[in-house]
Image (cartoon, rainbow, N blue to C red):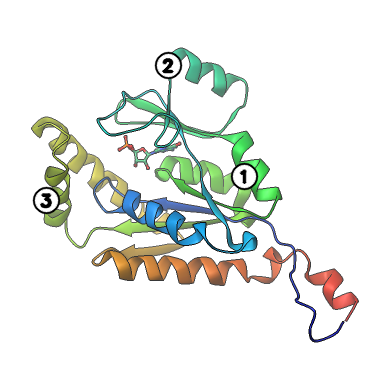
Amino acid sequence: MSLQTKVELGRRGLMSILSSPSGAGKTTLSRRLLEKYQSAPAHEAIVMSVSVTTRPMRPGEVDGRDYFFMSPAKFQDMAHKNQLLEYARVFDHQYGTPAAFVRDHIVKGIDVLFDIDWQGTRQLAEENRADLISVFILPPSLEELERRLRERAQDSEETVKKRMEKAKAEISHWREYDYVLINQDLDHTLQKIDVILKAERLKRVRQEGLPSFVAEL
Ligand code: 5GP
């Protein structure tokens, strides 16, 4: 092979999970990551897995972008037909990851990003350990988390209290994650996630084209 030839090895897409309590910055981080990789070359592309949920739409949310909003009956139907890779009940509502979208992208070598909770992370890790990395985002403090939840001003006082309780429960699962980041500064956290993704993509087992490349050296 001439030195001028650009070497591009095939690889499987990575399933990257970002979990955190609500208000720790995960949604903003996912959006920023997607924007960052939008203009990246095809082998660095990332797409977001859009979950299905039975929870009502919040102001500003868009069906098909933030979630696919659906009735409990439709959700059950998808679950029974094995169309969900994982699903769980969070805050009195059902959430699940549509399977087809994820499979289609992973086999093409396109990374998929997930914003799911610890229950979903556990289920995905059981089935897809080799393709999966999980990152837990911690808030700098519980006070800061509460401040961010109130700032969002979309939830009632009772909901904020409930979410703070849930946040503590979610945080108790931090040890189950491959990486744990304290989100003090959004830009720094984004840089760290970027480094993690880049290193994980370079792992030997993920570079499926390596054996044939080496054989032909
Ligand atoms: P929210 O209602 O604030 O959008 O999300 C509530 C929680 O549900 C978040 O912690 C989010 O990560 C989690 N979640 C969203 N989609 C899914 C999913 O498809 N599966 C699981 N297991 N959790 C999800």
Query: Reading the chain from its start, which is encountered first: label 1 or label 3?
Result: 1
Q: Secondary structure at mark 1?
A: helix
Locate the N terminus and report the quarter of the image it occupies: bottom right
Q: Is mark 2 within 8 Å of ligand 1?
A: no
Identify the disc placed on residue 72.
Answer: 2
C-alpha gap between disc 1 and disc 2: 25 Å
Q: Is mark 3 within 8 Å of ligand 1?
A: no
- Res 190 → quadrant: bottom left
**Residue at 45% over, 54% down:** 34
C-alpha gap between disc 1 and disc 3: 37 Å
C-alpha gap between disc 3 and disc 2: 32 Å
Image position, residue 184 (x, y; %): 23, 66
Image position, residue 187 (x, y; %): 31, 68
Q: Mark 2: give few (<14), some (14-19) or many (20+) Cα within 10 Å.
A: some
Q: Is residue 187 left or right of residue 41?
A: left
**Residue at 86% over, 70% down:** 212
Image position, residue 216 (x, y; %): 90, 77
Locate the C terminus and report the quarter of the image it occupies: bottom right
